[in-house]
Image: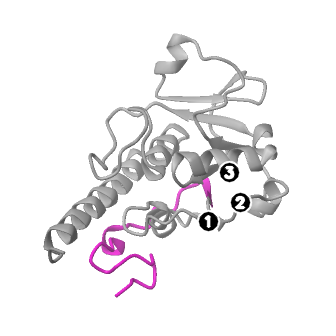
Amino acid sequence: MTCPTCRKPTAVCVCDRCLPLHPKTRVVILQHPQEQDVVLGTAPLLEVSLGAQRRVGLSWPNLAAAVGDATGRWAVLYPMSLPRPLTPEEAEAPFLLLDRHGVAKSPPVDGLVLLDGTWSQAKALWWRNPWLLKLERALVTPREPSIYGRLRKEPRRTFVSTLEACADALVANGEPAETRDALRRALRTLVQRARDAEAAAPAP
């Protein structure tokens, strides 16, 4: 059985734990079409909790084509291919905004673009959409390891799930701390239900 809202198996669905948060910051998720982690993927949780818009594809001609109303300041959350090397202080900062020339900027931005998929898939989205280079860059240094733990290995300690990075970025952008807490709570529930479902599955 599949949940009609999040499209996850009902055994791991956490729609009952996703609170409507109504952030001021718009969130748009560009998801690679081969992102197939139906069980552990976090984009559905962001859709349910934040009203985030998810676009599945490989490329869009410009920001407006990807997000619809593109007015205001937009930043893309992507930690690689930076316009310049970071200083040691910047590399440790919980949140950093850089413009296309590498100049540090202050929040808030009006919208966040998230690239969703494996890290290789996110890299493909980055290179296939050169207009992303025109956006400000949002960088997050997580305070804690990923909630996924051993269920889904990240290539670096500072790399976390789309939801976790988004939660930190939203609070740094002016959203209440409860937004981060609610999103992380939903992800912890998802991870626990995935572990429970795996443990209950019959042995092959």
Query: SS for tag 1?
Result: loop
Q: Residue furthest top?
A: 88
Query: SS for tag 2?
Result: loop
Q: CA distance from mark 1 to mark 3?
A: 10 Å
Vertical relation: 11 (above or below) 122? below
**x then y, percent, for residue 145:** 32, 37
User: Which of disc 3 and disc 1 is earlier in sequence?
Assistant: 1
Which segment did they paint magenta?
Answer: 1-30
User: Was residue 182 drawn as part of the magenta stretch in this picture?
Assistant: no
**Residue picked out by circle 2:** 58
User: Which of disc 1 and disc 2 is earlier in sequence?
Assistant: 1
Contact (CB < 8 A) between labels 2 and 3?
A: yes
**x then y, percent, for residue 23:** 53, 56
Contact (CB < 8 A) between labels 2 and 1?
A: yes
Give the residue type at disc 3.
Answer: Leu
Q: Residue furthest front?
A: 204
Give the residue type at disc 2.
Answer: Leu
Residue at (75%, 60%) from the top-left corner?
66
- Quadrant of the image containing the C terminus: bottom left
On residue 33, which mark appears? 1
User: Which of disc 3 and disc 2 is earlier in sequence?
Assistant: 2
Q: CA distance from mark 2 to mark 3?
A: 6 Å
**Residue picked out by circle 3:** 125
Give the residue type at disc 1.
Answer: Pro
- Secondary structure mainly formed by the magenta segment: loop
